[in-house]
Image: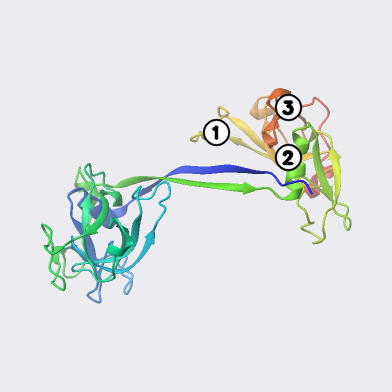
């Protein structure tokens, strides 16, 4: 049996969100080396602050300052840190109950070795040298030793209220403070190795030879491209390979007008579902070689392959599709493939 193909893949994007009045205060407090929590209707203090009270579901009436020291509630050792984690050397993930808080905060503890970690140990924050209004403004926690750090609140002591109102929810309008942190952008990245199935591997190896293959269901006779290994309609294995031409019909399409990070084709351009001749399911690809406004359902198109020296075991061997100049396919020929 031929070994299935595999390749390292990376998915990454920048996630930007509006913080809202509560988390804006929390992030702004971190830039000042202060940790804030919200007091709930039942008297408990939540850290990070809850945007809505878990009991009444109303916005919090009060923010309070907690910590900065705390007590380890539970922990787990991380012997081999991964990319993007808080520390480059072995560390502990821990649930830390900050002084004056009733819920635990998840963060990293730089203890050096696991034998220095213990449930119930006292820790203090190690602040980042350049605050940015992110949870990473707390670079990590570290063992507190015997003496309390500056600004610590004694364990069990009442936290200091920052804002309180008797009746209405507190006014946390971050726009009133020019220095308030109201938006954050968090880079998200996932690295993994994808192993193609046996059917996918045959499909990709065929593309490396300039050929497109699908698989036929022995029960309903439908041809699927790329091959799926089993018919999604009948549930039986699709074991017969079918070589398909690189011409087809546009069934549906959309015109992309909004640019995005990493975009390779200038807007506007057309992404379309192309039904290859002899196939029973379309697949998405670019339509170039004409104006976006000229693309239509039923348009006949052919694949434009990259130069042969650029071919590999990838669907990118087909750079795009372009019009063939043939008459449009009749609607009835592709209506049941929409």
Element marked by disc 1: loop
Element marked by disc 3: strand
Q: Position of residue 29 (x, y in %)?
A: 20, 53
Q: Is residue 50 visible?
A: no
Q: What's the CA distance linking mark 1 and mark 3?
A: 25 Å
Instruction: Looking at the image, tell me whether mark 2 or mark 3 is earlier in sequence order.
Output: 2
Q: Is residue 193 left or right of residue 181?
A: right
Tag of residue 204: 2
Q: Position of residue 315 (x, y in %)?
A: 69, 36
Q: Nearer the viewer, residue 269 or 148?
A: 148
- Circle nearer the viewer, 2 or 3: 2
Callout 3 crowding tier (Cα within 10 Å): few <14, some 14–19, many ≥20: some
* Contact flag, marks 2 and 3 (Cβ < 8 Å): no
Pointer 1: what residue?
Answer: 257
Q: Is residue 47 left or right of residue 226?
A: left
Pointer 3: what residue?
Answer: 305
- Circle nearer the viewer, 2 or 1: 2
Q: What's the CA distance linking mark 2 and mark 3?
A: 14 Å
Q: Please report the residue visible at 78 percent of the width from the left and 56 percent of the height from the top.
A: 230
């Amino acid at each position: 049996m031929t070994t299935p193909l595999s390749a390292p893949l990376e998915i990454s994007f920048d996630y930007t969100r509006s913080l809202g009045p509560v988390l804006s205060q929390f992030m702004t407090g971190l830039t000042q080396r202060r940790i804030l929590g919200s007091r709930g209707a039942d008297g408990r203090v939540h850290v990070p602050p809850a945007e809505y009270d878990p009991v009444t579901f109303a916005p919090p009436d009060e923010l309070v300052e907690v910590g900065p020291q705390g007590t380890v509630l539970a922990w787990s050792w991380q012997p081999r840190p991964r990319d993007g984690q808080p520390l480059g050397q072995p560390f502990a993930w821990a649930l830390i109950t900050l002084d004056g808080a009733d819920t635990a905060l998840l963060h990293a503890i730089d203890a050096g070795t696991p034998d220095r970690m213990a449930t119930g140990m006292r820790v203090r924050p190690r602040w980042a040298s350049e605050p940015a209004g992110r949870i990473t403004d707390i670079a990590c926690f570290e063992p507190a030793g015997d003496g309390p750090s500056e600004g610590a609140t004694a364990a069990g002591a009442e936290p200091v209220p920052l804002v309180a109102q008797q009746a209405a929810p507190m006014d946390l309008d971050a726009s009133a403070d020019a220095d308030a942190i109201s938006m954050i952008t968090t880079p998200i990245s996932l690295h993994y190795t994808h192993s193609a199935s046996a059917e996918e591997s045959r499909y990709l190896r065929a593309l490396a030879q300039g050929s497109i293959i699908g698989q036929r269901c022995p029960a309903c006779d439908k041809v699927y491209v790329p091959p799926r290994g089993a018919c999604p309609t009948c549930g039986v294995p699709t074991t017969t390979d079918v070589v398909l031409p690189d011409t087809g019909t546009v069934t549906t399409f959309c015109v992309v007008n909004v640019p995005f990070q990493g975009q390779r084709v200038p807007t506007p351009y057309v992404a379309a579902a192309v039904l290859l001749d002899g196939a029973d399911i379309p697949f998405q690809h670019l339509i170039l070689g004409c104006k976006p406004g000229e693309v239509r359902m039923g348009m006949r198109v052919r694949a434009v392959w990259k130069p042969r020296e650029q071919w590999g075991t990838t669907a990118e061997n087909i750079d795009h599709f372009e019009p063939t100049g043939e008459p449009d396919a009749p609607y009835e020929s592709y209506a049941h493939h929409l």
